[in-house]
């Protein structure tokens, strides 16, 4: 048994596994957990009513009835209300969202949203400036966990993400930049699987929730590359956050509650300029190495298009809560990509970088999700290694 499976430098990054685990445990995880509970960071603006551009025939996406409605039922055409009565067989309509664990709780308290520009991000498919159909969702009430979304619909999304947009490496033709896109998606996929395993419906009859370590092993731990990609994605997003530190520090975290807003600002400062982080892992990922070749600009455009497709695919996720977290995390990744790759020259970062409120919320919530996954994987991996190696 290889005891040092996760030692040494995380592939394509600049820090080793031990340092990442230590920093996460000591600095990042505690601060991020506090941060995402603040009023500013717990409300995410999202269009949950999907306009899936890829499979218009998919019943799941046409059924508004499947999702929790944010406006009175009387406003919907009769045919939306009870699709099973309208000549479609129940096999066509596996209404995942009928399961309580898949539904989104839209309870929001009214908070002020001020001081942020609204611009469009070239890495994502949603037009962030378009307010139609957008709702605010309280993320604290909607944890990412098991929802019962399995089968062909879920498989089709992952297949499309991998095979159409970022073919699996190793493949001779795949350049460093494409490999990175693959690793980001795989790392996010690992993190989603970890959250399913960490918070699983163990017994439907008694509504008992808990950890499913078999699932964790089967989907994640037995694949070292998936674990490696999780760490990679964590470091990549961390680099984006620290690169944008000056911008994020000066941003307004106003919600109308000055005491809480000061707290938000202070947690952000703790995270962005933490001396332990700067000493142990000053450059979690080195983006300056990329897009160097002659075809750099074309390549960037191509990969940007691929990522936009992945972002659009999130509208086809047939379970509302999965769609919420899929959209948030892909927006978070798109924001990280925007910070690292769309700004023309580091020296101009302060002047040219413009983030929206929702992007910053997505970015920090994504970092928190990845940090939770790293914590869970490290904890369980250590326990399982101990069990396997003890007599
Ligand atoms: P899947 O996880 O569907 O994987 C499909 C295939 O992809 C695997 O067979 C394997 O070949 C490959 N693969 C798996 N993991 C990786 C990896 N890390 N890197 C590279 N390749 C990999 N379900 C929930 O219960 N809760 C959620 O919140 C949730 N969110 C989702 C969000 C999105 C965007 C999508 C597309 C699905 C989501 N799902 C969620 C469904 C969940 O991800 C699985 O698809 C489902 O649980 C079925 O799992 P599976 O074992 O068939 O493998």
Image (tube, grey):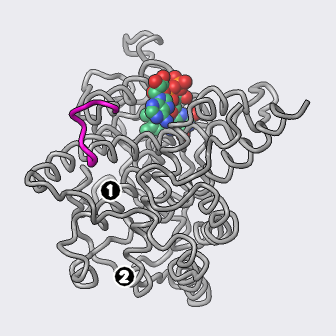
**Distance (Cα) linking label 2 and label 1:** 17 Å
The magenta segment is 169-177
Q: Residue at x 36, y 26 (%)?
A: 159
Q: Is residue 262 above or below residue 391?
A: below
Residue 383 seen: yes
Q: Quadrant of the C terminus?
A: top right
Q: Which residue is mark 1?
A: 334
For disc 2, the marked residue is 247
Q: Provide the secondary structure element on which disc 2 rests.
A: helix
Mark with earlier residue (2, 1): 2
- Residue plotted at (47% across, 51% down): 232
Q: Residues within 10 Å of mark 1 (few under 14, many from 20)?
A: many
Name the disc covering residue 70, or none: none
**Against 276, is 217 above or below?**
above
What secondary structure characterizes most of the magenta part? loop
Q: Is mark 2 within 8 Å of ligand 1?
A: no
Determine which quarter of the picture holds residue 23. bottom right
Give residue 34's quadrant in the image. Answer: bottom right
- Residue 258: % across, % down: 56, 90
Quarter of the image for the N terminus: give it: top right
Report the side of 57 relative to 38 (left or right): left
């Amino acid at each position: 048994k290889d005891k040092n499976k996760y030692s040494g430098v995380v592939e394509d990054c600049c820090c080793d596994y031990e340092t990442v685990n230590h920093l996460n445990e000591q600095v990042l995880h505690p601060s991020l957990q506090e941060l995402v509970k603040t009023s500013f960071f717990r409300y995410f603006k999202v269009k949950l009513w999907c306009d899936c551009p890829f499979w218009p025939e998919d019943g799941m996406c046409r059924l508004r009835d499947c999702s929790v409605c944010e406006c009175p039922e009387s406003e919907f055409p009769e045919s939306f209300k009870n699709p099973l009565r309208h000549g479609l067989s129940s096999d066509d309509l596996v209404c995942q969202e009928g399961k309580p664990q898949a539904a989104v709780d839209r309870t929001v308290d009214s908070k002020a949203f001020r001081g942020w520009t609204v611009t469009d991000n070239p890495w994502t498919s949603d037009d962030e400036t378009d307010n139609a159909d957008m709702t605010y969702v309280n993320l604290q009430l909607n944890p990412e966990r098991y929802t019962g979304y399995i089968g062909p619909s879920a498989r089709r999304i992952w297949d499309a993400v991998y095979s159409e947009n970022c073919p699996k490496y190793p493949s001779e033709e795949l350049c460093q930049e494409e490999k990175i896109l693959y690793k980001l998606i795989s790392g996010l996929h690992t993190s989603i699987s970890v959250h399913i395993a960490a918070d699983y419906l163990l017994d439907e009859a008694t509504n008992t929730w808990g950890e499913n370590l078999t699932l964790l092993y089967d989907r994640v731990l037995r694949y070292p590359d998936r674990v490696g990609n999780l760490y990679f994605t964590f470091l990549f997003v961390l680099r984006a956050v620290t690169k944008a530190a000056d911008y994020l520090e000066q941003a307004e975290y106003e919600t109308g509650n000055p005491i809480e807003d000061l707290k938000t600002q202070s947690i952000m400062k703790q995270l962005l300029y933490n001396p332990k982080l700067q000493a142990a892992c000053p450059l979690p990922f080195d983006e300056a190495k990329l897009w160097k070749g002659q075809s750099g600009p074309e390549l960037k455009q191509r990969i940007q298009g691929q990522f936009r497709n992945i972002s659009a695919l999130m509208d086809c996720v047939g379970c509302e809560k999965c769609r919420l977290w899929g959209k948030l995390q892909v927006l978070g990744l798109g924001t990280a990509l925007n910070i690292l790759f769309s700004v023309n020259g580091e020296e101009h970062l302060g002047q040219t970088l413009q983030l929206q409120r929702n992007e910053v919320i997505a970015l920090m919530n994504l970092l928190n999700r990845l940090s939770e996954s790293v914590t869970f994987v490290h904890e369980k991996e250590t326990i399982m290694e101990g069990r396997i190696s003890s007599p």
